[in-house]
Image (spheres, rainbow, N blue to C red):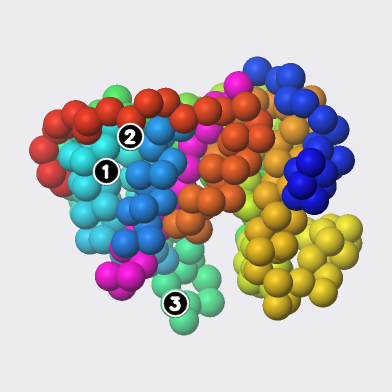
Amino acid sequence: MTPSEGLLAGRLGGAVDAAVPGVSFEFFPPNTPEMELTLWKSVKRLEPLRPHFVSVTYGAGGGTRERTHNLVSRILKETHLVPAAHLTCVGASRAEVDRVAEDYWRAGVRHIVALRGDPPKGAARFEAHPQGYDNAAELVAGLKRIADFEVSVAAYPEVHTEAASPQADLDFLKRKVDAGASRAITQLFFDVDVYLRWLDRAHKAGVSIPIVPGIMPVTNFRGAVRFAEGCGATIPHWMSHLFDGLDKDPETRKLVGATIAAEQCRRLQDAGINEFHFYTLNRADLSYAICHILGLRAAPEAEPVAQAGAV
């Protein structure tokens, strides 16, 4: 057994015996040719794992709108994957947002991730467009009026940074469900017990749709700390200790990151959770390795099937 295999076996408790999980992956639109090449290699690497869907993010203030459309279009045309396009309320009227959704439907996109969206760069807080959707619950209702989209929404195990209280945050999640959301995907978290306690409260609050944990494999710990601080997620002390001294050792950081995320998923499986949404950061290696550890195997490659027209 190699040192890497020994570490994984020790952390994960031996052989995998859970049912094969369902997975989905998140990508963001690239802004350079080099990043586009890396992204597309990642898309093709993960495609044989047959995820339920792959989501494509939408920048703050709608800043990546065109690149999001282009990436969704390419996924539709050149892969077997089912794309889910992010759509936000930021910086657009209801009519403009509705037109984007209508274009997606005509192009064959049937799944939208509906989000209020972050404030544009430089803005201190979110402000709705004067003729726009005020929040994600309104956006979900608007999408369901346009067409029978599958709609995923965001959920926050450690409470949205702008929520008045934990209960108010759950009440708003219930509003999104009542508006027509069919799935919730959580913000990243690293403490499994925090998620499970919150999940119990969500169920008691009447949230009946699947709530899929969002998993972010970490290789750049300092970057993860900054990201977590921005979205109100907690970094456990034990996690900091595991990355200590690895600033100049990227290969070991990858192993540690994969081990942490795989153990997180295994603990969730033990609690009856067996669907995971991976924040890939446009890189396939860790997500692919974690899926393999969890028992998910690649399907034989096949020629892409022509799908509905371009966005």
The image quadrant of residue 46 is: top left
Question: Which residue is identified by label 2?
Answer: 81
Where residue 198 sits: x, y (%)?
76, 38
First-in-chain label (1 vs 3): 1
The tally of labels here is 3
When the figure is inspected, residue 143 is found, relative to residue 129, above or below; the finding is above
Q: Is residue 219 magenta?
A: no
54 relative to 12 in the view: left or right: left
Crowding at dot 3, Cα within 10 Å, few <14 / some 14-19 / many 20+, comes out as: few
Image position, residue 237 (x, y; %): 88, 62
Which residue of the protein is positioned furthest toward the front in this rendering?
A: 1
For the point 27% across and 70% down, which residue is it?
A: 33
Residue located at (45% from left, 57% from top): 282
Reading the chain from its start, which is encountered first: label 2 or label 3? 2
Residue to which mark 1 is pinned: 75
Circle 1: element type:
helix
Taking depth in this image into account, of 219 and 142 the one nearest to the observer is: 219
CA gap between label 1 and label 3 equals 28 Å
Residue 12 or residue 105, whichever sits in front:
12
Which residue, as the protein is rendered here, is positioned at the far bottom?
A: 122
Please state which amino acid type lies under the numbered disc 2: Leu
Residue 127 is situated, as x and y percent measured from the top left of the image, at 44, 66
Q: Which residue is mark 3?
A: 121
Give amino acid for label 3: Lys
Quarter of the image for the N terminus: give it.
Answer: top right
Whole-Å distance between the Cαs marked 2 and 1?
7 Å
Circles 2 and 1, Cβ within 8 Å, touching? The answer is yes
Q: Which residues are magenta?
A: 20-36
